[in-house]
Amino acid sequence: MNNNNIGIIYCPTHRPFSSSKKRWELIAATLAKYDVKYDMIQSEERQSVERLVMMLINNNYKTIVIAGGDAALNDAVNCIMRQERHVRENIVLGVIPNGTMNDFAAFWGLTYKDVEKSVRSIKQCRIRAIDVGCVRYKNKEGEKCRRYFLNCVNIGLLASIQSLRQKTRRILWSRKISFAVSLLLTLFQRMNTRVKYIINSQKETHRILTLCIGSAWGYGQTPNATPYSGTLDVTLVRSTLLSQHIEAIWLFVRGKLLNHKRVLPYRTRGVEIYSDRYMPVSIDGHPLEAQVRGMSIDLEPEEINYIMEELKTK
């Protein structure tokens, strides 16, 4: 390995009419076109991403690029955040969208189809410090745990359909269509979770359909959130009648979910959430394996150095 190079972790994905080998050949050809020097390691499974990031850090790579989706990017962030501050301050994180879900990359204008735009961004290496969300909870054994996120935390219905969305995305090419289809399928599994939450010193109790805490777009549920504002956006959808559920889906598809009368939006630096029963939770698309009834979610401002979209040139 050449420590002066960029370390790229390639995470193959399963897409219809797509070859993992040809996809990497396209990425490699684009990197060569822009004369980007790099070393590539392929991730064979989800559990290997954090191990590979750790290996690159130990070999003194300062720029780590994830050619993958939201889940792989989340694993990389969690590995970086476990390092000492003086170590992570010298690490730069980038992404080439290549996953089932690439919503965080989409926030910055990067898409699966436009590989050149991602590579140009890496070549130019325009860096911005971005916020990192943190989920603190206790597992079933009572052990204190934490998990970091860049995009969002989902609780309730949307968390339960994250795996469903991943499956539909493998069949349906479009990100928006796969999400819309997944939401339509929720008509047959409408949830009604009672939660207590504390936000901005305000205590509330509601039966919810879904709850999203986002540092970025949150898969369209926190459309006004930005990962450098120092705050989290919270969108709570109270339990709905079937007709209101359909209306919520329609508003979501149109990007106007916050206009629904059963939606409560907040902006905060932290929130505490409790329930009398276990809550389905997903973090950046990762279903939380631990069964939890309570958690606190807050923000750590400007903790990750991130490669933004390239500067426009005349």
Image: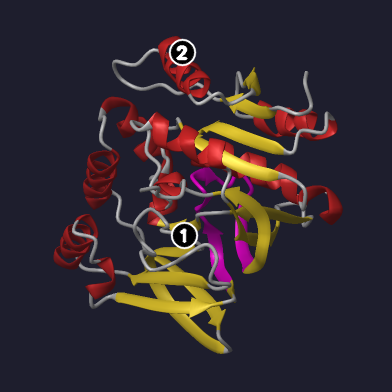
Q: Which residues are magenta?
A: 273-297
Q: Position of residue 224 (x, y in %)?
A: 38, 68
Q: Position of residue 152 (x, y in %)?
A: 50, 57
Instruction: Specify few, some or many for label 2: CA neighbours under 10 Å numbering under 14, 14-19, or 20 or more.
Output: few
Q: Which residue is mark 1?
A: 216
Identify the residue shown where x is 41% and y is 47%: 103
Confirm whether residue 84 shows in the render: no
Confirm whether residue 215 shows in the render: yes
| Main SS class of the magenta portion in the image | strand
Which element type, helix, strand or loop, lies under badge 1? loop
Q: In the displayed structure, does residue 204 sit left or right of residue 183?
A: right
Q: CA distance from mark 2 to mark 1?
A: 31 Å
Q: In the displayed structure, does residue 180 sit left or right of residue 108?
A: left
| Mark 2 in CB contact with mark 1 (< 8 angstroms) | no
Identify the residue shown where x is 42% and y is 17%: 26
Q: Quadrant of the N terminus?
A: top right
Nearest to the observer: residue 94 or residue 288: 94
* Sooner in the amino-acid sequence: mark 2 or mark 1: 2
What number is the disc on residue 25?
Answer: 2
Which circle, 2 or 1, is nearer the viewer?
2
The verdict on residue 124 being magenta is no
Which element type, helix, strand or loop, lies under badge 2? helix
Instruction: Specify few, some or many for label 1: CA neighbours under 10 Å numbering under 14, 14-19, or 20 or more.
Output: many
Q: Position of residue 36 (x, y in %)?
A: 58, 26
Nearest to the observer: residue 155 or residue 142: 155
Image position of 61 with respect to 274: above or below: above
